[in-house]
Image (spheres, rainbow, N blue to C red):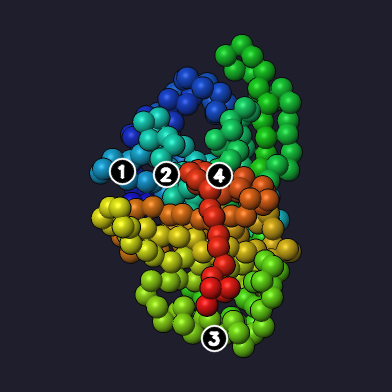
Amino acid sequence: MIREAAASDAAVIADIYNHYVTGTVVTFEEEPVSIAEIARRIDEVRSASLPWLVAEVDSHVGGYAYARPWNDRSAYRFSAEITVYLAAAHAGRGIGSKLYGQLFPILQERRIHTVMGGIALPNEASVALHEKFGLRKVAQFDEVGFKFNRWIEREEPGRMGTFEVREASLTDAEPLASLVTQLGYPSNPPEMKERLTGLLSDPCYAAFVAHNHSAVLGLGGGSLGKYFEKNGVYARLVVLVVSDGARGLGVGGALVEAVENWALSRGARELFVNSASHREAAHRFYERCGFRMTGVRLAKSLDALS
């Protein structure tokens, strides 16, 4: 469960953070931070009308993420710096993605236009997480920090632009026809409207669009299925496409997150995706989203048999 941080969370947040302070170069702080100081920082973030979220795992806080003002000069008021930390025992379980999946929509609601981060290098897991949500390296500072008797590099990832994700509707037929055509499947608005009519009325399907109030930026769709070989329900990411002009803004990651949340709400335990063998960039994207290659897909046309 993701929720707003409370004052009572300060102690466990301090424990999580101080693990990184005293044993890693992830943070450039060198002295353990007190519970009172963590409580003060939470209040400071709230006073700036920005979110501080925690992830509960088995009734315990397993990680947290927050945003703070990028700079106190007034012209920077639409920019924020984001941070995420996980309890060591909960790393690699997708908690960071869940936290950022909740954090970014809140920032969009609060009119934050640009988000920045800071990553001490090397840190492949953190770089992959931020890239999943559309952040790209905008700067790198060599030997900018000195901790544990060595110089440390720092990467600054950033993301510009805001968008929202919602369920698709029949009124989206025209822009979605254009997106599906861009994906390599020529479609026109009447055809897309007919498809949407069937898909949106079927509880085993879902479609989501990312938009920025002036244009549809991407489409993500999912379906449910049942196993023959075991009990339960699985989900499939059946379509994902982002407009050329919206690449690199985190649209794809946000749409995958929407399909994941829908699948979980329907009781699915696994999410699958098919991707053409030549689409290597797509494979890398899906790996950043947590997918792993597990087999090979074979296809056979039945037209000649009918």
- Mark 4: which amino acid? Glu
Q: Quadrant of residue 204?
A: bottom left
Q: Which residue is mark 4?
A: 287
User: Which element is circle 2 on?
Assistant: helix
Mark 1–mark 4 distance (CA, rounded to whole Å): 24 Å
- Mark 2: which amino acid? Ile
Looking at the image, residue 31 lies above or below residue 117: above
Q: Which of 91/84 is in front?
A: 91
Q: Is residue 222 left or right of residue 145?
A: left
- Whichever of labels 4 and 3 marks the residue nearer the N terminus, that label is 3
Q: Which residue is mark 1?
A: 57
Q: Position of residue 242 (x, y in %)?
A: 65, 63
- Mark 3: which amino acid? Glu
Q: Nearer the viewer, mark 1 or mark 3?
A: 3
Q: Which residue is mark 3?
A: 194
User: Which element is circle 1 on?
Assistant: strand
Q: Which residue is mark 2?
A: 95
- Whichever of labels 4 and 2 marks the residue nearer the N terminus, that label is 2
Q: Nearer the viewer, mark 2 or mark 3?
A: 3
Give the residue at x 62% y 64%: 241
Mark 2–mark 3 distance (CA, rounded to whole Å): 38 Å
- Whichever of labels 1 and 3 marks the residue nearer the N terminus, that label is 1
Mark 1–mark 3 distance (CA, rounded to whole Å): 42 Å
- Whichever of labels 1 and 2 marks the residue nearer the N terminus, that label is 1
Give the residue at x 69% y 58%: 247
